[in-house]
Image (cartoon, rainbow, N blue to C red):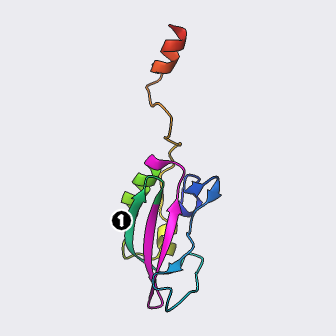
Amino acid sequence: MELRDHPLISHHRLPAWPPIWSPIHPENDRKSLKGEIGRLETVLASSPDKCFLVIEHEGKRFIGCLFMDDSNFCAKTTVTLQKYIGCTIKEIGGIDFPFNQPTRGLVERSPGVKSQSSAVREG
């Protein structure tokens, strides 16, 4: 699945890709931009549910924020995006991104093995 279409790159069920690009130096340029534009310069982890992307577009630097509801997926996405510094945002939007179910609040277990919560209810 392409990153641009990934359902977990979303915030409150709204797609977060691509972010809105705000100028880093708004005193010189106040115009925000939209779309898969520019070349990725930096990826910054901010909080468990968001990361910032810095791009260069037409000689100017912009920053965008990716919000994601799943904090574990956000951390994995941040690490993955750091490998694509220097690539265009359009190229990054097209990378094959693995589909994982939301991880917040889920207990991973082997088939046939009960989680502690179900064992307590039954026990």
- Who's the residue at 44% across and 27% down the image? 109
* Left or right of 4, for residue 54: left
- Who's the residue at 51% across and 74% down the image? 90
Vertical placement of residue 25 versus 52, above or below: below
Q: Which residue is label 1 attached to?
A: 82
- Who's the residue at 54% across and 13% down the image? 121
**Secondary structure predominantly adopted by residues drawn in magenta:** strand
From this viewpoint, is residue 114 visible? no
- Who's the residue at 47% across and 64% down the image? 95
Vertical placement of residue 88 versus 103, above or below: below
Residue 40: quarter of image: bottom left
* Left or right of 24, for residue 20: right
From this viewpoint, is residue 86 visible? yes
> SS of the residue at dot 1?
helix
Q: Which residues are magenta?
A: 51-72
The amino acid type found where label 1 is placed reads Gln
Q: Is residue 54 magenta?
A: yes
Q: Residue furthest front?
A: 27
